[in-house]
Every structure is written in C-alpha cells, then in structure tokens.
C-alpha cells in the first residue's frame, strides 16, 4: 500500500513530469517503514542563493504514528535535490528502525547495555561523559555575543547570558552565514 504524498512548491512551477516523478518515488517510502502514513515534499527555488548548488531546496517530511522524520537537501536542479533528499530520508528511516524496532530484546536499559569504554593509557574504565567543562557567563546583548563568538573562534555556537531577557541563550551560525538564537524556556 502506498502512503499519501503531498507536493508543495515555492517559486517553482510544478510540471506534470516533476509531480509524477516525486509522487512515484515518495509513495514508495512505506516499503522501508510500513507505518508511514503521509509524506510531504516541498520543492523551492531561491533565486538569491549565493551558490547555484543552493538554489533548489527540497524538504521531505514523513509522518507516522508517533514519529516525524524530516530531511532537506540542496542542488542545482530540483530533481537532483529530491533524489539526494530521498536517499537521506531512506537512511533516516533505517536509523529510526534500528533504534525503535530492533531493540535489545533482553530488557536491559541503554546504560546497562552500553559497552564500557576502556582508556588505552591506564587500562581503567572511562565514564560515559568524557569531559565536563565549566565557564563563567558574562551578561551581554546579542551583538556583543556575536563579537565574542568571533573573537574566541567558536564557529558553531556560543552560550551567553542575555542581559536583555535575563536568560541563558545559545547563539549559533546558520548554513547561510547568518546567526540564529536559541532562547530555552523551562517546560
């Protein structure tokens, strides 16, 4: 049985050929995981992208009972980006199945089943958390955090105390070079 496929487009004309190709391939995802109920495929074209390989963006989101899997890929052609995203989705499905369907089956917890890590130098057991780091948070605003992030050479993320919101925030660099801000809240 094929899962339901919804195709959405932004800044791109959905030709019959593209729609047929996407529907045919995406409807077969339930062969990898029968509990998939729906797949949404979004095809987008960004004319202003810096690189030609980033102009066509395809997102595939798969919905099933109790799970959502999503992937995004970019390429210079829409169908090439779709094929890359589909391959990535198949790998995600296999990883999901490995974690949720092929369990250990012996009733042990993950901590009990984890293989002990032995330090090569001392021959002693190493803890699962290999390194803990403490640091002082200085109050600063978002702009100052960006400057500090650059000065320290932290390319991926920077944790700081936001003086404007009186909360701890995480500043991170996005794929396109801009910055994102995570503002955690207690649930």
Image (cartoon, grey):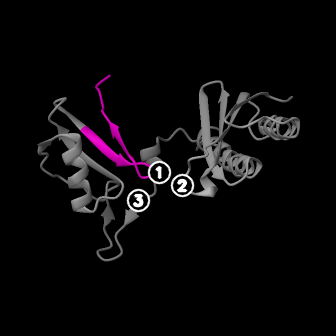
**Dot 1: within a 10 Å radius of its alpha carbon, few (fewer than 14), some, or many (20 or more) residues?**
few
Where is residue 78? Give x, y as percent: 73, 47
In this rendering, position of residue 125 left or right of residue 16: left
In the picture shown, does residue 26 fall above or below 144?
Answer: above
**Dot 2: within a 10 Å radius of its alpha carbon, few (fewer than 14), some, or many (20 or more) residues?**
few
Q: Which label sits in the foreground, 2 or 3?
A: 2
Q: Which label sits in the foreground, 2 or 1?
A: 2
Cα–Cα span, label 2 and label 1: 9 Å
The numbered mark, 1 or 3, whose residue comes first in the sequence reads: 3
In this rendering, position of residue 130 left or right of residue 29: left
Looking at the rendering, the stretch of residues picked out in magenta corresponds to 169-187
In the picture shown, does residue 168 fall above or below 133?
Answer: above
In-front residue for pair 63/42: 42
Q: Secondary structure at mark 2?
A: loop
In the picture shown, does residue 185 fall above or below 89?
Answer: above
Residue at point 32%, 51% (across, down)? 157
Judge whether residue 176 is colored magenta.
yes
Where is residue 47? Give x, y as percent: 61, 46
Quarter of the picture holding the N terminus? top right
> As drawn, which residue projects farthest toward the front?
48
Q: Residue 50: which disc?
A: 2
């Amino acid at each position: 049985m094929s899962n339901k496929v919804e195709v959405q487009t932004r800044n791109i004309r959905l030709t019959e050929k593209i729609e047929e190709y996407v529907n045919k391939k995406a409807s077969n995802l339930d062969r990898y995981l029968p509990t998939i109920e729906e797949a949404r495929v979004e095809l987008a074209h960004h004319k202003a992208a810096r690189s030609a390989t980033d102009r066509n963006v395809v997102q595939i989101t798969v919905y099933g009972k109790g799970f959502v899997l999503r992937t995004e890929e970019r390429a210079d052609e829409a169908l090439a980006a779709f094929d890359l995203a589909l391959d990535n989705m198949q790998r995600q499905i296999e990883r999901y199945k490995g974690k949720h369907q092929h369990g250990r089956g012996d009733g042990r917890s993950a901590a009990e089943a984890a293989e002990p890590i032995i330090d090569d130098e001392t021959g002693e057991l190493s803890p699962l958390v290999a390194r803990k780091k403490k640091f002082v948070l200085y109050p600063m605003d978002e702009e100052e955090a960006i400057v500090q992030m650059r000065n320290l050479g932290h390319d991926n993320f920077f944790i700081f105390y936001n003086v404007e919101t009186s909360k701890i925030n995480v500043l991170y660099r996005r794929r396109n070079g801009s910055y994102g801000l995570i503002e955690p809240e207690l649930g």
